[in-house]
Every structure is written in structure tokens, then in C-alpha cells.
Amino acid sequence: MLHCRFIVISAVTALAFIVTGCQQPENSKHMPDTRSIAEENLGVAIFAGGCFWCTESDFDKLPGVVATTSGYIGGTVVNPTYKQVVAGKTGHVEAVKIQFDKTVTSFSELLNTYWLTIDPTFEDGQFCDIGPQYRSVIFYLNPEQQTLAEASKEALAVSARFDQPVVTEILPATEFYMAEDYHQDYYIKNPLRYAYYRNNCNRDERLEQLWGVSH
């Protein structure tokens, strides 16, 4: 079983990924100064979709997303560490806090993207990462987000797209703790290790099976 953590790969393995066409993230991240966005136009969303390296990478690609932060939410321990969270004993979930420009995108549009990045039928984890700390959750920050999230989930459930029930949770946001620095922008800092992890987790293969889209 693979977990969202450092994976040591040899030069031969790295070369194999390049030769076989494994796409690697660009070593840059568009990160506008959020101070240039009027406060009333700056929105926040928090999504848990398994490994936060992958969730962060997926949302950084979207127009209107101005910042992403990997972290932990939903647990009972104050200032949890990565080791505590992945052990599954704190109640936290790996998640990403997304800041977005509401003049460019919306919470509803982020929700639409979120579904396409997860397996909403997987109850106790996501892809190769097993355990409640990797489960899919939409954390709402206000009643409007709650209403939109619940309506979006209901629409997916009644669409009969899946034979299994949609089990993604919708919960009120609690204290969000920023993950350790080495987890932030992991796909940029460690592109080969990230590509190795994502490929071996069969994340994109499963997403294509579910949604018919490539990532």
C-alpha cells in the first residue's frame, strides 16, 4: 500500500518515467499576491480528497485559484503532526485550503472540479491511501457553501452515474492546521517523487474510469 509520503526512487526509475511519458509538473506556481484582491472578492474553500499533494496540484491549475495550502482538519488534537495524522489517531483528514478570486471563479465551479478529482464512492480512503485520514470531505465555511455542497452531492447521487452510493461527507469546517513546510507545493519541489507516487497510486487511471477525463 502506498501512502502520501516521501518515496525514494532510483535514477533508473526516474528515467523510466520520463521515457514512458509520465507528465511532470512545471517547476513554477502562479501565486498572485492576495492583497491585490479586494477582501469581498476573496473566497475560501476546504476540500479533502485523499493525498493533499494531489489535491493541491489539481486545484493550482484552475483559473481564479490564487493560493492553496495543504493541512489537517476535523480532528481533536491541537497542532497535529503529519506522523500523528497518518497514524489515524487524531481524527484529522488531509485537506487543502483554497483561496480563490470570486470575480474569476466560484465555489460552485470549485465543487464541480472537486468531484472530478476524487472517487466519491470510496468510503474509507481514496485510491491507494486507506484510512479515515484520507477520506473525501467537503468542509463548508458558511450556510451558503453547505447548501451548495449538499445540492451538488444530491445531484450526483440521483444522476445514477454510479452503482454505489456517493459517500463523500459534508461537514462544518473546524480549525485548519497548516501541514509541515515540506508538504507545501510538494509536486513542484519533488516532481519525480510526486509523479512516481501518483502513477503508482493509479489515481489518474481510476479517475478516467469514473469520469472519462484525463488529468
Image (cartoon, rainbow, N blue to C red):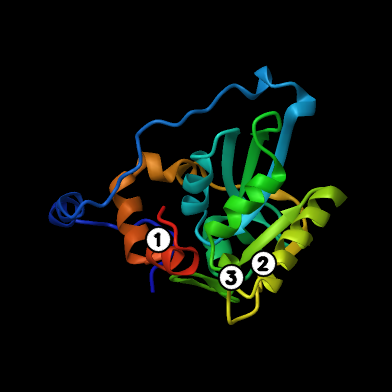
Furthest residue toward front: 159
Q: Nearer the viewer, residue 37 or 172?
A: 37
Would you say 112 lies left or right of 62 here? right
Residue pictured at 21% horizontal, 54% vertical: 17
| Residue at 62% in and 61% down | 93
Per the image, label 1 sits on a secondary structure element best described as helix
Q: Is residue 28 above or below residue 76?
A: above
Question: Which mark, residue 88?
Answer: 3
Secondary element at image label 3: loop
**Neighbours of disc 1 within 10 Å: few (<14), some (14-19), many (20+):** some
| Residue assigned mark 2 | 156
> Where, quadrant-wise, is the N terminus in this rendering?
bottom left
Q: Nearer the viewer, residue 204 or 15?
A: 204
- Mark 1 vs mark 2: give the one in front: 2
Q: Count the marks.
A: 3
Q: Nearer the viewer, mark 1 or mark 3?
A: 1
What whole-number distance in Å separates the C-alpha atoms at marks 2 and 3?
29 Å
Residue 90 visible, this angle: yes
Cα separation, mark 1 vs mark 2, equals: 20 Å
| Residue 96 rendering spot, x and y as whole percentages | 60, 49
Which is nearer the N-term, disc 1 or disc 2?
Answer: 2
Q: Residue 174: give x, y in percent of width and height.
A: 77, 54
Neighbourhood count class around disc 2 (C-alpha, 10 Å): few under 14, some 14–19, many 20 upward? some
Tell me: residue 39, above or below residue 162: above
Q: Nearer the viewer, mark 2 or mark 3?
A: 2
**Location of residue 213 with respect to 31 vertically, above or below:** below
Residue at (17%, 57%) from the top-left corner? 13
Q: Which mark is residue 204?
A: 1
Say what amino acid the circle numbered 3 marks: Gly
